[in-house]
Image (cartoon, grey):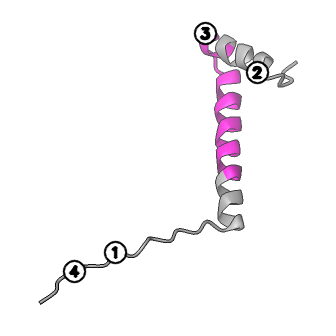
Amino acid sequence: MNTQQTSLPIQTSVTAASRLAQIGLAAFLGLVVLGVAGFAPIEAIHNASHDVRHSLAFPCH
């Protein structure tokens, strides 16, 4: 008796809408993190966020 198993390749397709949603959520999360850190009352966190925004040419003032 031949018990040879055939493995089928797993096909994963990412639709354009799914990819766009992932990019949008990642961008939103990044902006929230920068916004929260930028307005943080702890000066070290605020200054770190400020330096990152300048290094990315992101207008902050």
Q: Is residue 37 above or below residue 12?
A: above
Dot label at residue 61: none
Taking the magenta stretch, the answer to whether it contains residue 44 is yes
**Which badge, 4 or 3, comes first in the chain's sequence?**
4
Nearer the camera: disc 1 or disc 4: 4
Nearer the camera: disc 2 or disc 1: 1
Q: Which residue is mark 1?
A: 7
Taking the magenta stretch, the answer to whether it contains residue 35 is yes
Pick the front one: 47 or 22? 22
Q: Are marks 2 and 1 in contact (CB under 8 Å)?
A: no
Nearer the camera: disc 1 or disc 3: 1
- Where on the picture, by quarter, is residue 22? bottom right
**Dot 1: what SS?**
loop
| Kind of residue indicated by mark 3 | Ala
**Dot 3: what SS?**
helix
Residue bounds of the magenta highlight: 23-46
Q: Which residue is mark 3?
A: 44
| Kind of residue indicated by mark 2 | Arg
Instruction: Answer whether residue 5 is visible to the viewer in this image.
Output: yes
**Which badge, 2 or 1, comes first in the chain's sequence?**
1
Separation of marks 1 and 3 at Cα, in angstroms: 54 Å
Dot label at residue 4: 4
Q: Is residue 21 above or below residue 48?
A: below
Residue at horizontal 78%, vertical 23%? 56
Dot label at residue 53: 2
